[in-house]
Image: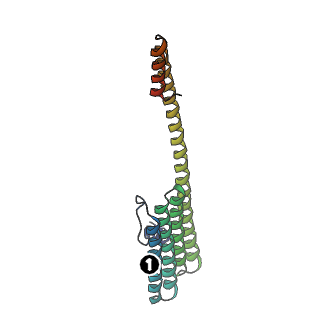
Amino acid sequence: MKSIAASTFAAAASISFGALSADIMLSKPQYQAGKASIEAQYKAAKAACKSFAENAKDVCLVDAKGRERVALAELEATYSPSAKTDYDVRIARASAAFAVAKERCDDKGGNARDVCRKEAQAVRTAARADAQASMKTTDARDKADNKIAAARKDAMDDKLDAEYAVAREKCDALAGTAKSQCVNGAKARFGKS
């Protein structure tokens, strides 16, 4: 059975203010409008927390702040996509969910509260480890892709050099102006100077 902290974490991690698709690139004005919208949504969510009392109010406020941070991280990732901004989104989600789960633990007492907090910390640690692994995997994949591209370029250069050598050799059978034209044609065809 899933613990309360884990389910709280999952629920909080999946919620954000006006989540944006990472497939969309934003202009600077869209980015600024997004920030203003997130700020307005945060203020509205914070105002809605006034209707709660005691720890429920604290949970609501922590949840609103966490959703704001996640939305800002998602906005940044949409505006400047990279492995780092994707990592930042995952960390923001983990931190927001942890803060909510930890705040909910305050409703419990004694050992139950301690266990609840440890469960929340364990879920956050796992989420952070997953984010770190994802970023390292993306970096490794990018480096491998770069090496593959470099190897393909080297292979293509070697092929072109070999074909150029053949074309030059064919020109050796000619003499005078015909040979010069043949050599110049081969140079132009294979991008040699």
Q: Residue lying at the far front in this picture: please name it.
A: 177
Could you say which is closer to the camera, residue 170 or residue 43? 170
Which class describes the residues within 10 Å of circle 1: few (<14), some (14-19), or many (20+)?
A: some
- Please identify the quadrant where the N terminus is shown: bottom left
Left or right, 12 with reference to 112: left
* Residue 58 placement (x, y as % from top left): 52, 83
42 versus 3 height, above or below: below
* Residue 84 placement (x, y as % from top left): 55, 58
Please give the name of the residue rendered at 49% of the width and 15% of the height, measured from the top-left corner.
169
43 versus 74 height, above or below: below
The residue that disc 1 covers is 41
Instruction: Report which quarter residue 24 is drawn in.
Output: bottom left
* Residue 26 placement (x, y as % from top left): 44, 63
SS type, badge 1: helix
Could you say which is closer to the camera, residue 22 or residue 80? 80
* Residue 39 placement (x, y as % from top left): 48, 77
All told, the count of numbered labels is: 1
Could you say which is closer to the camera, residue 102 or residue 27? 27
Amino acid type of the residue tagged 1 in the rendering: Gln
| Viewer can see residue 94 | yes
| Viewer can see residue 3 | no
| Colour theme | rainbow
Left or right, 123 with reference to 16: right
181 versus 125 height, above or below: above
Please give the name of the residue rendered at 57% of the width and 72% of the height, measured from the top-left corner.
117
